Image (tube, rainbow, N blue to C red):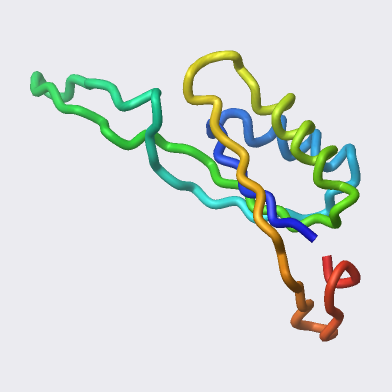
Amino acid sequence: MKKIEAIIKPFKLEDVKEALREIGIQGLTVVEVKGFGRQKGHTELYRGAEYVIDFLPKIKLEIVVSDDMVSKVIETIRESAKTGKIGDGKIFLFPAEDVIRIRTGERGEDAI
């Protein structure tokens, strides 16, 4: 099993969620985060004062999948989150040693 974390632009969340649903992903965790990479920040004007926005709003998706679904999930996220502009995001892949469903005690892939 693998844990996939993806940082995407907020307005792409619905597209990504729908694309994942179409390939059979039944659950994911969504967290609103802030950060920056090459996109850096930008300057805004508020009541005549200029200030810098260093951290931009992003969405972090967390999904645990079986090994045979990893490539499909990564490609689905990549295609559905892509705008072709700086700041589209990143996908990270981690090993998931075990998963336990709290309600039933199921473990491993049965708990996904």
In the image, taking residue 6 as reference, residue 96 lies left or right, namely right
User: Total marks drawn?
Assistant: 0
Residue 20: x and y, percent?
A: 80, 40
Q: Is residue 111 above or below residue 87?
A: below
In this rendered view, identify the residue nearer to me: 33 or 107.
107
| Residue displayed at 78% across by 36% down | 18
Q: Is residue 1 above or below residue 90?
A: below
Instruction: Point out the residue furthest to the left here.
Output: 49
Image quarter of the N terminus? bottom right
Residue at horizontal 85 percent and vertical 54 percent from the top: 67
Q: Nearer the viewer, residue 45 or 1?
A: 1
Point out the residue furthest to the top here: 84
Q: Residue at x 22, y 21 (%)?
A: 44
Q: Quadrant of residue 23?
A: top right
Is residue 12 toward the left or the right of residue 101 in the image? left
Residue 108 is situated, as x and y percent measured from the top left of the image, at: 84, 72
Q: Residue at x 69, y 56 (%)?
A: 3
65 lies above or below 85? below
The image quarter in which residue 92 lies = top right
Residue 111: x %, y % from top left: 84, 71
The quarter of the rendered structure image containing the C terminus is bottom right
Q: Position of residue 97 (x, y in %)?
A: 73, 70
Q: Is residue 28 left or right of residue 26?
A: left
